[in-house]
């Protein structure tokens, strides 16, 4: 039963991460179509970047603690990438160069999005599997 | 066509024909001109020979040289004149822009072949009636087919062909000694032509006549050819084989000749050595050099007389490619360089238009401003936007009837419909807030090193002397703050007799001691300001504070200015050490160079500066940074402030008021008094299918295509690159419109609009023909400098070289493949200087060498400066002028005002420095006066006075009481007046005075080899070799 709750928690965390990433993508898209100015756009994005990183780190540890080491392994590359960005201080969007980096920032977040969706499916799959097991 | 060429690398002579056909796309005429040109080309081919004349033995290399030389106004040209004169075509063609030199050699071989196998094909073309230009094109295409057949002939002839190139002379007993190597071929050509020609002839004879005489007295005739033929020639020249085409054209020629007025500047072919061998064959003297400085593309402006002047807008190529595939084959940058407020000579000022009653006329959909290229229809009630082709209504107040030709009858009173550049007075819709007065805020470092250098005194005096000339009287506002380990603000309220100083020493939480009165109206508080400036130097003369709270001071200044915006001038001397934004002495760490961390040295260390810059721009504050330190001050970080706020960086390493005072005084005065546009935004619009994608220069992007420029002036240029959105452009013409919305110093909101049109072409050759080397170099250098921020210097240099190589390779594929041009280098006439400028970019301060070749601060400040320079100034910096002075000084009769003699620029190589001479090196930022070892002591004595024998590093140049010295000083003044944007300071160097000579002058002689970097010849050889690889 505990396992099922673990999967449920990871499910909601993944959804939260997805929302954050989609939000960032929306800000970038708005910027591209000139609906908001670069100052607002970058400050909105920058506000959620650190929470996103923390949340993802927590999720990774959570998988480890609950013994889902396959999921841990799967989310480690993501974590590594985030940590690397953070250590290089490249994690925040640079308002002065945002237009030159727009494509790169979008591409990076799209990758994250697909990555998260994959994780989400996996976790749903395992959740159902656990639920069925429990049921039996 | 390109593909065809590739297909038959070696002898695809025929493809040559295609270029012709293609060339015309926009205007049919071009191709035809080729016929005329053909002749020319041949001639050009011959030109090379002239140089040979002196040294008949030097076959291969010389020809090339010759051709170039001709381009350059070298002696060979003279020779050519006569021949050209005779041919009628010359008259038709506008005076050549100077472009034509193509390679002479290639034409010959073809000619030789032609008689053998080709004659028949020729006949065909001939047979065709001399058609109008349009018809001609098809012809030109046709020829390729026949050409194909004769391959054998080609092979047959090939030996001949080769010979001329490689070392032809000996093999070809030149009929006329004068004409040497190239001529033999030529002679044949003529003969062939005669043989075959008879039917064709009518057009031909004149040409022949022109040429025939030439050989004997070759020299004079040639020039004329160039002049007359120049435009057309280019086409022919590239392909020797084309000669047939040419012939054909000739057959039809007469009409063609007249038509061709269009120029096709062509490829000039220089002979290179055999790859791999260090061939003395390259004649150093013959390599192209931009000794005339920047040449604006005149043909383009002639084609579209209503375009704005090139000083405002220059396209890297005036022929816009019509397809994405064409863009990908154009390896050079595709874009524009814009200098929206360039200084116009008297009489050409931009007219100001006030649409009071109607509001500004703009397209409803794309917001384009009304311009000379819009068309009025429906009896004048509608106008069609030239950019998006939407039909707009003409407002009632703007209505005017159309005359029979469809032109508005009031055209003469409407500058916006006749001039490419115009300024609209903007109504209130164009204001976010009422126009702000010009604001100047000075933030001055008063730490001990600043005091010692004397900077404060010079700055205070200069500002005081400029108070009358600050733009915007009587609204101008002014304010001051100084900082060391604390920040000092000054209350300048007009009611005070003396300024009040208020010290803020809490650096963590900056607050303003007064809500207002820190920024005051200059006209009201004039006396207080003057008192302050008079006392400023003495106030701090005993200051021994070594700290610098730069970051907090910047924040304070920002708080003072945030209401109004304006210009923030920062005088900085000590590395920021306190509070936010403090910087480390990361300085020049030798070990970092060559590693992946190298580029981080050129990036701002602390994100504070970028954030601050973004904030400053948001509040319309522009930063001009003046840095004076003798130690490392991290210009890379500080310069960021100027970069994103549209400002500039002036760096005076080791400032000493006695030495650099004049320079600072001049440049600060210029900064304070030049006409400045405030609160500006700039956008460049262009027709459907094209889009500007990246922007380069000092500004911040506010949206994808809107540049925010808190302050703009005439010395700033911006570059941008464009890309195609659609795979195929269907329009004939693309229009560009630069719109700068700004507040003039007088408080009026204005929109300056520059409009230009450029033809769309389907042919790569045409793009090359219309290329503007100046704009390309400008974009190139900006891209290279940006690359140094994310890559190693080495990589940045390689990328410059690589792009040049790719471009030349593409060009070679286009034209040269058909021949076995073993040792030759082919390049478009329009880009003949590109390789040299490429070398100069690699040798420029931001990119040169490694750790030891330039200090990090100098590199960065030069980089920031080069990102803003207009084209002309940049080219001068890249390839400075070297002028011999002593002859002029000794000539008693010479008038100083007559600078003509002094306009003779020398190639930048040490071999041109005669030990008996006195030379001036002028890159627009510095003067170096070089004293030869064997310079007569009299001259040195009269110029330097008593210390003429002393070490020159300590000597300064000032006027002595003798004619020669006065003359020199006046000459220098003249040069400075020509370009007032910077003040070149004079440095004296004596020959052999190491290491100063090497450091100051020799390392700047671009054409010489210098410690591991290439000289001009090596560079050309290297590029040539790379072009040939896999070519």
Image (tube, rainbow, N blue to C red):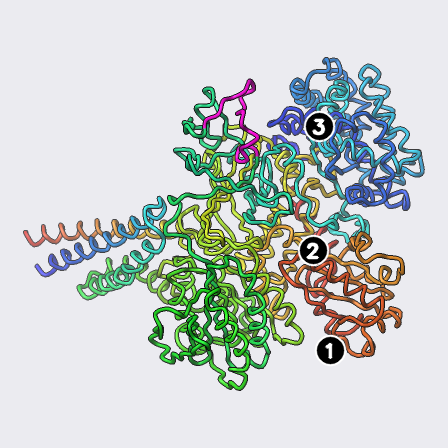
SS type, badge 1: loop
Q: Residue furthest left?
A: A135
Who is closer to the viewer here, B896 or B591? Answer: B896
Residue B49: image x %, image y %? 85, 39
Q: Label 1: which residue?
A: B954
Q: From the top left corner, tell me how far across and down residue B936 is, in percent.
A: 89, 69
Occupied quadrant, residue B157: top right
Q: Quick check: can you spot residue B597?
A: no
The residue that disc 3 covers is B261
The chain ID associated with circle 1 is: B
The residue where tag 2 is placed is B978
Q: Quadrant of the C terminus of chain B?
A: top right
Q: Which mark is residue B234?
A: none
**Residue B486 lies in the magenta-colored region:** no
Q: Can the viewer see residue B184?
A: yes
Q: Quick one: label 1 or label 3, which is nearer the N terminus?
A: 3
Query: Looking at the rendering, which quadrant does residue B758 occupy?
Result: top right
Q: How far apart are the alpha carbons under marks 1 and 3? A: 58 Å
Q: Secondary structure at mark 3?
A: loop
User: Which chain hosts label 3?
Assistant: B
Q: Nearer the viewer, mark 2 or mark 3?
A: 2
- The mark lying in front, picked from 2 and 1, is 2
Alpha carbon of mark 2 to alpha carbon of mark 3: how far?
35 Å
Residue in front for this viewpoint, B245 or B307: B307
Query: What is the crowding at mark 3: few (fewer than 14 residues within 10 Å), some, or many (at least 20)?
Result: many
Q: Which residues are magenta?
A: B399-418
The quadrant of the image that shows the N terminus of chain B is top right
Q: Callout 2: residue from which chain?
A: B
Magenta span: predominant SS is loop
Q: Earlier in the sequence, mark 2 or mark 3?
A: 3
């Amino acid at each position: 039963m505990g396992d099922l709750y673990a999967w449920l928690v990871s499910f909601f965390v993944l959804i939260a991460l997805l929302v954050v990433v989609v939000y960032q993508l929306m800000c970038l898209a708005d910027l591209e179509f000139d609906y908001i100015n670069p100052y607002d756009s970058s400050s909105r994005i920058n506000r959620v970047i650190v929470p996103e990183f923390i949340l993802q780190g927590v999720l990774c540890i959570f998988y480890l603690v609950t013994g889902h080491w396959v999921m841990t392994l799967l989310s480690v590359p993501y974590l590594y990438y985030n940590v690397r960005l953070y250590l290089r201080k490249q994690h925040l969007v640079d308002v002065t160069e945002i237009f030159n980096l727009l494509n790169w920032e979008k591409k990076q977040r799209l990758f994250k999005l697909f990555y998260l969706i994959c994780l989400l499916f996996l976790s749903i799959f395992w959740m159902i599997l656990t639920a069925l097991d429990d049921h039996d | 066509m390109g593909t065809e060429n590739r297909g038959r690398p070696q002898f695809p002579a025929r493809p040559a024909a295609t270029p012709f056909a293609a060339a015309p796309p926009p205007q049919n005429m071009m191709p035809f001109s080729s016929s005329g040109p053909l002749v020319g080309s041949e001639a050009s081919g011959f030109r090379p020979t002239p140089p040979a004349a002196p040294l008949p033995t030097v076959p291969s290399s010389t020809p090339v040289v010759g051709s170039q030389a001709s381009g350059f106004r070298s002696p060979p040209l003279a020779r050519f004149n006569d021949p050209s004169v005779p041919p009628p075509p010359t008259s038709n063609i506008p005076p050549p822009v100077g472009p034509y030199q193509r390679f002479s050699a290639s034409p010959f071989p073809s000619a030789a072949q032609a008689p053998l196998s080709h004659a028949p094909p020729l006949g065909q073309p001939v047979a065709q009636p001399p058609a109008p230009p349009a018809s001609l094109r098809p012809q030109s295409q046709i020829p390729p087919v026949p050409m194909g057949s004769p391959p054998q002939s080609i092979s047959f002839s090939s030996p001949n062909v080769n010979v001329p190139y490689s070392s032809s002379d000996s093999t070809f007993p030149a009929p006329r000694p004068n004409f040497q190597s190239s001529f033999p071929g030529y002679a044949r050509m003529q003969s062939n032509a005669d043989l075959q020609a008879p039917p064709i002839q009518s057009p031909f004879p004149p040409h022949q006549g022109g040429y025939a005489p030439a050989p004997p007295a070759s020299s004079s005739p040639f020039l004329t050819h160039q002049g007359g033929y120049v435009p057309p020639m280019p086409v022919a020249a590239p392909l020797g084989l084309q000669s047939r085409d040419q012939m054909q054209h000739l057959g039809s020629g007469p009409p063609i000749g007249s038509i061709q007025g269009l120029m096709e500047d062509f490829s000039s072919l220089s002979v290179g050595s055999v790859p791999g061998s260090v061939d003395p064959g390259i004649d150093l003297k013959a390599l192209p050099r931009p000794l005339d400085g920047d040449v604006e593309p005149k043909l383009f402006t002639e084609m579209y007389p209503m375009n704005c002047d090139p000083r405002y807008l220059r396209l890297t190529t005036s022929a816009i490619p019509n397809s994405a595939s064409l863009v990908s084959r154009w390896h050079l940058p595709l874009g524009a360089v814009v200098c929206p407020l360039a200084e116009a000579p008297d009489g050409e000022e931009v007219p100001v238009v006030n649409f009071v009653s109607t509001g500004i006329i703009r397209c409803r959909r794309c917001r384009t401003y009304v311009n000379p290229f819009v068309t009025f229809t429906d009896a004048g009630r509608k106008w069609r936007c030239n950019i998006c082709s939407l039909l707009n209504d003409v407002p009632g107040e703007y209505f005017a009837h159309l005359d029979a030709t469809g032109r508005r009858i009031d055209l003469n009173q409407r500058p916006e419909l006749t001039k490419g550049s115009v300024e609209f007075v903007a109504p209130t819709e164009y204001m976010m807030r009422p126009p702000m007065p010009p604001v100047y805020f000075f933030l001055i470092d008063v730490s001990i090193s600043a005091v010692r250098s004397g900077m404060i005194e010079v700055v205070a005096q200069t500002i005081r002397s400029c108070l009358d000339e600050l733009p915007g009287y009587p609204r101008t506002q002014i304010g001051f703050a100084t900082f060391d380990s604390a920040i000092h603000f000054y209350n300048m309220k007009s009611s005070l007799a003396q300024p009040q100083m208020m010290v803020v020493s809490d650096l963590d939480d900056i607050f303003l001691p007064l809500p207002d009165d820190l920024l005051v109206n200059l006209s009201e508080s004039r006396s207080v300001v003057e008192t302050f400036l008079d006392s400023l130097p003495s106030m701090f003369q005993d200051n021994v504070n070594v700290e610098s709270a730069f970051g907090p001071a910047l924040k304070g200044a920002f708080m003072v200015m945030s209401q109004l915006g304006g210009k923030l001038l920062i005088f900085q001397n000590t590395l920021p050490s306190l509070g936010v934004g403090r910087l480390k002495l990361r300085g020049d760490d030798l070990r970092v160079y060559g590693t992946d961390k190298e580029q981080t040295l050129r990036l701002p260390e602390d994100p504070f500066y970028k954030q601050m810059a973004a904030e400053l721009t948001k509040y319309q504050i522009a930063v001009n940074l003046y840095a004076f330190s003798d130690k490392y001050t991290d210009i890379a970080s500080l310069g960021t402030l100027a970069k994103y706020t549209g400002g500039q960086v002036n760096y005076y390493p080791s400032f000493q008021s006695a030495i650099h005072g004049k320079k600072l005084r001049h440049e600060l005065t210029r900064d304070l008094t030049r006409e400045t546009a405030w609160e500006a935004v700039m956008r460049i619009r262009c027709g459907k299918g094209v889009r500007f994608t990246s922007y380069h220069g000092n500004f911040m992007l506010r949206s994808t295509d809107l540049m925010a420029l808190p302050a703009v002036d005439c010395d700033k240029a911006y570059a941008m690159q464009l890309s195609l959105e659609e795979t195929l452009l269907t329009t004939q013409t693309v229009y560009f419109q630069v719109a700068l919305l700004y507040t003039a110093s007088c408080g009026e909101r204005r929109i300056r609009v520059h409009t230009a049109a450029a033809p769309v072409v389907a042919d790569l050759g045409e793009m090359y023909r219309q290329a503007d080397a100046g704009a390309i170099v400008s974009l190139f250098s900006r891209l290279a400098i940006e690359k140094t921020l994310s890559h190693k210097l080495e990589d940045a240099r390689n990328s410059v070289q690589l792009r040049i190589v790719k471009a030349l390779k593409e060009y070679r594929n286009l034209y040269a493949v058909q021949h076995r041009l073993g040792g030759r280098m082919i390049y478009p006439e329009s880009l003949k200087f590109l390789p040299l400028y490429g070398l100069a970019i690699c040798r420029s301060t931001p990119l040169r060498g490694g750790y030891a070749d330039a200090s990090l601060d100098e590199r960065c400040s030069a980089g920031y400066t080069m990102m803003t320079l207009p084209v002309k100034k940049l080219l001068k910096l890249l390839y400075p002028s070297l002028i011999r002075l002593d002859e002029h000084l000794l000539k008693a009769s010479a008038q100083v005002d007559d600078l003509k003699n002094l306009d003779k620029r020398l190639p930048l190589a040490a071999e041109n420095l005669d030990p008996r001479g006195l030379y001036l090196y002028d890159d627009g930022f510095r003067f170096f006066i070089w004293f030869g070892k064997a310079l007569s002591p009299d001259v040195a004595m009269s110029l330097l006075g008593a210390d003429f024998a002393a070490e020159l590093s300590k000597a300064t140049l000032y006027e002595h009481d003798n004619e020669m010295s006065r003359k020199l000083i006046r000459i220098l003044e003249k040069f400075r007046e020509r370009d007032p944007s910077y003040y070149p300071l004079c440095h004296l160097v004596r020959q052999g005075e190491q290491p100063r000579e090497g450091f100051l002058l020799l390392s700047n002689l671009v054409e010489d080899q210098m410690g591991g970097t290439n000289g001009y010849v090596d560079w050309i050889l290297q590029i040539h070799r790379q072009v040939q690889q896999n070519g």
